[in-house]
Amino acid sequence: MRDIMRMSEDDAYERFKLLRWPETKGEPICPDCGSRDHYALADRRKWMCKKNSCRLQYSVTSKTILASRKLLFRDLIGAIAIFVNGVMGVAACRMIREMGLSYKTAFVLQHKFRESMAIDYDEILDGTVEVDGAFIGTRRHRFPNKRIEGEKEFDEFLKKHPKKQSSLVVVRERPHTDPTRVARVRTVHVENEGAGIPFARQVVKRGVEMHADFGLQWEPLNLYYDMKRINHSESYSDGIACTNFAESFFSRLRCAERGVYRNFTKSYAGRYGWELAWREENSRVSNSRQLDMLISSLMRSPRSSMAGYWQRHKTLAFFNT
């Protein structure tokens, strides 16, 4: 972290170039046509494609999730370093204090980080896989302002102001025998656990061994996978089936919910799931490597749905699937 904060603007810029175009060791490639022939525009850190049918002017962040950025590269890389250093996550208010950013900037920037963490969700999981779900957003948003006498009156209050909760479903690979392979973690935010079955079918190779609890919502998975079921009312592992790796992810989720973010609202719960799945997946990776991985993901991510958020140019989906 000390070395990152001591970086000059030019050093940070060169690091972004190298991670944007690793195949050419930082030499620019046109994001539209893929041409490597370009003109360098003087004093602007921009290039123009030489191809007559293209002639695009572009920079190192053009056509990425960080397009139209206003932060300096050294501030941007410092914000990324602070974000990856948080084991359970980093609140926007912490980034405000440490980087001197406005809340609006920190809020949108962090959600762009989370969005880029899900860029590799199209990879198919194999090996032995566990699936499970957890309720989130269980905090009641309205409480009585005075004591309610009587059980009937309290029940009526609960019916008028129910808890606003949904489910976060995790699909996680168990560690591979090959130490070079990372056990991947995928999450999806849905209304209930059963609604996560299409996502599980999408990201898991058909026919692999899958472990789940005895919940009836997982019964349709028997048609596509070699299911192993564990009855949690009796034990958490019976030597045949268990979902302990999925429960390990939920342990991180609850710690982040209670200690950092306080509550996951439905509009953004899917994004927090992406972030915590990425942190769980790369928990054994060094911080410097995580920094480069996140920058590389940002450089590969397209325009964000958070672009123009505070101007209301975009409306977020209710559930981020």
Image (spheres, rainbow, N blue to C red):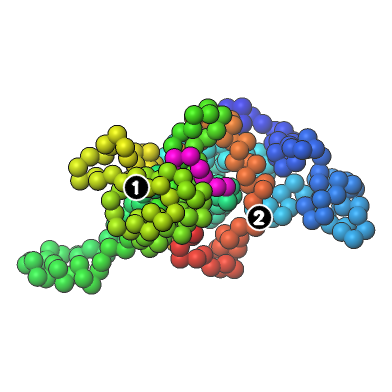
Q: Is residue 292 left or right of residue 157?
A: right
Which stretch appears magenta? Answer: 123-129
Query: On the image, numbered disc 2 is attached to which residue?
Result: 302
Q: Nearer the viewer, mark 1 or mark 2?
A: 1
Q: Residue 231, how many percent across, how many down?
A: 24, 46
Query: On the image, numbered disc 1 is attached to which residue?
Result: 212
Q: Residues within 10 Å of mark 1 (few under 14, many from 20)?
A: many
Q: Is residue 175 left or right of residue 262?
A: right
- Under mark 2, the amino acid is Pro
Which residue is more in the foreground, 68 or 182?
182
The reply to whether residue 121 is in sight is: yes
Q: Residues within 10 Å of mark 2 (few under 14, many from 20)?
A: some
Q: Main secondary structure of the magenta part?
A: loop
Q: Residue 254, how many percent across, how many down?
A: 34, 45
- The vertical placement of 312 against 170, above or below, is below
**Which residue is found at the position 38% from the left and 63% from the top?**
191
> In the image, is residue 126 part of the stretch drawn in magenta?
yes
Q: Residue 60, how many percent across, how many down?
A: 75, 46
Which residue is more in the foreground, 42 or 122?
122
Q: How many marks?
A: 2
